Image: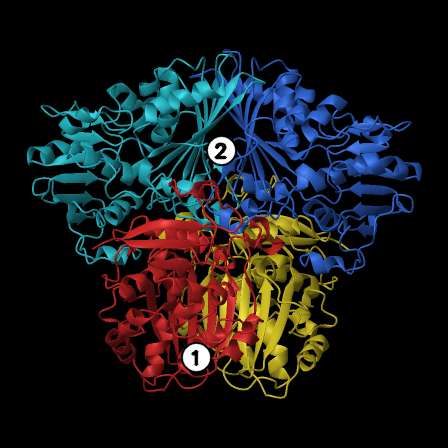
Chain colours: A yellow, B red, C cyan, D blue
Amino acid sequence: MKKLRIAIVGGTGYAGAELVRLLTGHPNADIVAVTSGRAAGERLSAHCPWLSTDIALSSFDAEKIDADVVFFAQESGFAMENAATVISNGAKVIDLSADFRLRDPAQYSRYYHREHSLPLPNFSTVYGLPELTPHEDIVNADLIANPGCYPTATLLALKPLFDAGLVEGTPVIDAKSGVSGAGRSRSETPYLFAERSGSMSAYAATGHRHIPEIEQSLGIPIRFTPHLIPTPRGMQITAHLPIKGSLERDDISHCYHKSYTNHKFVNICANNPEMKQVTASNRCDIGFEIDAHTGYLVVISVIDNLVKGAAGQAIQNMNIMFGLEESIGLPIHGVWP
Amino acid sequence: MKKLRIAIVGGTGYAGAELVRLLTGHPNADIVAVTSGRAAGERLSAHCPWLSTDIALSSFDAEKIDADVVFFAQESGFAMENAATVISNGAKVIDLSADFRLRDPAQYSRYYHREHSLPLPNFSTVYGLPELTPHEDIVNADLIANPGCYPTATLLALKPLFDAGLVEGTPVIDAKSGVSGAGRSRSETPYLFAERSGSMSAYAATGHRHIPEIEQSLGIPIRFTPHLIPTPRGMQITAHLPIKGSLERDDISHCYHKSYTNHKFVNICANNPEMKQVTASNRCDIGFEIDAHTGYLVVISVIDNLVKGAAGQAIQNMNIMFGLEESIGLPIHGVWP
Amino acid sequence: MKKLRIAIVGGTGYAGAELVRLLTGHPNADIVAVTSGRAAGERLSAHCPWLSTDIALSSFDAEKIDADVVFFAQESGFAMENAATVISNGAKVIDLSADFRLRDPAQYSRYYHREHSLPLPNFSTVYGLPELTPHEDIVNADLIANPGCYPTATLLALKPLFDAGLVEGTPVIDAKSGVSGAGRSRSETPYLFAERSGSMSAYAATGHRHIPEIEQSLGIPIRFTPHLIPTPRGMQITAHLPIKGSLERDDISHCYHKSYTNHKFVNICANNPEMKQVTASNRCDIGFEIDAHTGYLVVISVIDNLVKGAAGQAIQNMNIMFGLEESIGLPIHGVWP
Amino acid sequence: MKKLRIAIVGGTGYAGAELVRLLTGHPNADIVAVTSGRAAGERLSAHCPWLSTDIALSSFDAEKIDADVVFFAQESGFAMENAATVISNGAKVIDLSADFRLRDPAQYSRYYHREHSLPLPNFSTVYGLPELTPHEDIVNADLIANPGCYPTATLLALKPLFDAGLVEGTPVIDAKSGVSGAGRSRSETPYLFAERSGSMSAYAATGHRHIPEIEQSLGIPIRFTPHLIPTPRGMQITAHLPIKGSLERDDISHCYHKSYTNHKFVNICANNPEMKQVTASNRCDIGFEIDAHTGYLVVISVIDNLVKGAAGQAIQNMNIMFGLEESIGLPIHGVWP
């Protein structure tokens, strides 16, 4: 097979650099362009010294970009403006921002404080969570909306339970994220090492922007509070789910195994997984316990926010879209310690 | 006033050493003995080089200990065996273990896997959470059961709301603790720096032993899962509380201020507090947000698990017990960064 | 004694906030003003939520400041402009910047890239390292130049050895600092938590600006490279010192004990001290080993860069200047873990 | 090419697990056995949940092990006892311990406190640092002594300079290591997260056991002190080297480039590299500055102690030994942040 010609828009941020890192080891990929708004003309490695590469950064020009796949690793708003042009010129787009994740433009406006342009005329977009989205929808799309990190970890853990009708009442989702989720350019005091080290805090304790993305899939309101944990990478969801009293461990196990038998990146654990066991891997590990005392199921899922929660999942979508084996080029083991 | 003569049983663990650190700066305290099971005869500073002191460690002998107050900074089981003897010899006991926290011996047996001896004959014990326990009860007690760290952070945040009847249904308490909560002698693989750094995990996702202590005070079952956070000290509680729909921010504020107006160590914050802002201080900072979307109140409280959650609160209890101003010798500011 | 009326210029930075934290517990101090360039009019606690205080921030006005002592916790350049006015109005100044540390204005210009104004006319300034500077000089000064953090840790470890003629040849000083040394407003990418966590690096591998301050005291050129360590606070110096072959451990011990017998904040350790054992304390702990294999003495000293390396030492200078016992209000124990 | 049949002795420690992680992605390798002293019969993933694998752990039996290559990831002493048997049965051995690194048995006894058995009779051993050892020696060896982590980072940085005669006098090597260097079973108090976090310390300030390994290659005595840094992985060497006064930056550059032009894992940087930029990669990045002020060259090199300093280098040696391209299966990019 001819190698896919890849362009990465926004290569010096955490997700963009992670795309470069993973795709340079991908046997079917050939990176033809990495763009940067601020550093065009300079070497990528000058900004990302962990990457051992000669790639020179270029400017983004939607009209001229020449690639089979274009990854947008940009802030929300960018894809809305540029996707149609890029697709018209013959490329598929995989967008890591929120622009095409929500079906309801009103929700987008409310949470992202920006009017949403009309849906892409003549082009098909799909929300691409590979373990939950039918693969033929991914194959046929012009643009894949790569899910957010919190929705990925939450939906992989909860969607099968909701689909099976096992949860009753409001799910309480207490989420924890490493600091890289804030991005590389959030150089404000609260993100400084001296402030973050040895601390943690809730943020957006109510009203976080990933709520509508999760609710769109689950179909009911969720109680959701995310926290910043003093670790550079990683994400853990602790979901407290009211359940029917008669459920037993095997019922939950059965439900998960039915959903994920053929999905090698989702791993149902005998014990509660911990955040670091999936660092730098594309896995989502899920554990659970029934709390008979209160009638709740506690589900814990962990991902690497930059891999399964961003760049890795984007590549998994690319693999599916182009008929490749979905795990090609993606690490299955975590890096530990 | 004559200085109180203090003995600390278990001086090389984290809570015991913290008692030494704080009490050497206390104007009304005179440390007359620090004991250690393993290191009697050696200098305390050889085991705790952060303490600049000439104190030599001694052996514990319940019959011979000669002090006004004896702090037990030992594992559960120790106080049951030794408290009566120490009290009989004329000392007050402040116990940092769980031995006398639970009123129901059956609960103690269930959660601590040990039969509880009968209540102390002829002696009075009190659960001493100074902002919630009547001070005259503390003054009149022979033994103070110093609360657990999770119960301290949880009850200070929740008890006023429950007493005022503002919460309806099961509270979901998602707790986060620094690693020192495991103690200094838990030298097992999961507590190694290399394993913990950059990670986090739930533990005792159901059935944690602090649950009955919290439920004894609140009077209803709680959903509770604690997590280990990669920080040496600190504790945060995120409580998701179903509330009556008509409640507003001012109702909650009013409830808290009524409870804590005269309590300088509880601080109701305009913003969500973060874990580190109370490091090395005896404060408990509390913030909250109403989530109208789902009908929940989100309450966040932070303490230093070794100060307000252990040694500091024990000293606060001592101050009250002996008629001193309750804040003497206790830091009010956090150490940052 | 009447309380000293204290003003702190620059109260929301790390050193300034540390002055507030320590001085609010100082029995002879009364903080009458805390200024801030950016946040005048706001509450200090809004910017420093770890401080439990009602202090409101004010603007700095050199002409109007009314205090017995004024601490300058500002960038270099500020003291040169404002010290004379403040002193003329009757206050003593303790300056935490580099403005008056170097005797040679040419050195100042070279390392701080700014012309140095003439020495303060009619006023006396002193470099105040309390264990090495004669206390009468501190008492008689109008302005105390509070030493830099690296010079404090280095000179306390090396000066007695040099004065005794024990070192031959170029000392190699390999220094390590926590990230707070960069200040609270250095919100650039390299200081972000996500970048710093799990990493370390040398910076200013040659030509660091604290070199002339150390050389001014030792009298010979030094090889000096500092490193940034992933910890918020703390500093360690590892000095590799070529020595005369016949020296033994006792010779070094004797030299140190002669110098520091009456100095409670300098502690000569039997073992190599580690960085955290002096966290939040005003101590400097020093350990050493002779490497007979190569003819070197290895000396290790640790301080808290914000206490003995900044705010604590400034208060120690204040105590001496005003005839107080030098350790009043200053913590001797470290906070651990 | 037929896949190499690989056995890993000691699969649940950090280096052993890293071998599994890297070799399961290696196109020419087939892991046929992973042994464990304590956990034989159990699943590897039960002990290393970051590895997504079905491998079951087996017992080690030198007589019965059946493989093309056997990696020993064991404490020193193990290889001496078992290598001859394994080689006699037809396998090549790559030993990650110190047993065959030192040519002088007296040095081994002095630093490892154990008599060294005679050299392996009839078998050839080689010290395998692929950028410095002739590849034909590696090809022809029966056993490769994989270098220590400190020697790897130090020799790659210093050997070309020494060979070119650019250094005069004693090199001062101030080394810094992440905590995983202590191994996974060092569950003693000083390695606990609560103790290590926020701290750092020198250890073996004189007399570290990697000194003779470095001196054997450089040919002169070295001043060497290692430090433990609060990061799980990573290693940095800061070498302070007295040089001839006339040397300029280009001379050093030229020397390095001549040595490493064809070695893709050694990277000479324009700026000082930092520890994390090579995390999880097999690279060694080297930077340097001339300090004309004192006549020293400061060289900084960084590696991942578990990859280039252990498992990665072992695989690089394997690749060379079996005629494969030396970089196969080895990551070139670092994982960041």
Q: In terms of secondary structure, where does tag 2 sit?
A: loop
Disc 1 residue type (three-letter): Gln
Q: How many marks?
A: 2
Task: Identify the image quadrant of residue D304.
Answer: top right
Image spot of residue D203 (x, y percent): 55, 34
Tell me if residue D254 comes above or below residue D101 in the rendering.
above
Image spot of residue B116 (x, y percent): 52, 74
Task: Identify the image quadrant of residue A327.
Answer: bottom right
Number of other residues with Cα within 10 Å of mark 1, as a class: few under 14, some 14 to 19, many 20 or more: some
Tell me if residue C168 comes above or below residue B156 in the rendering.
above
Q: Nearer the viewer, residue B183 or C7?
A: B183
Q: Which residue is mark 1?
A: B216
Structural distance between the alpha carbons of marks 1 and 2:
48 Å
Q: Nearer the viewer, residue A127 or C222?
A: C222
Disc 2 residue type (three-letter): Asn
Q: In terms of secondary structure, where does tag 1 sit?
A: helix
In the picture, the quarter occupied by the N terminus of chain A is bottom right
Residue C248 visible in the current orientation: yes
Q: Are marks 1 and 2 on the same chain?
A: no
Number of other residues with Cα within 10 Å of mark 2, as a class: few under 14, some 14 to 19, many 20 or more: some
Name the residue rendered at 65%, 35% in the picture.
Answer: D149
Tell me: D59 left or right of A125.
right
Image spot of residue D239 (x, y percent): 54, 25
Q: Which residue is mark 2?
A: C271
Task: Give the letter of the chain under mark 2.
Answer: C
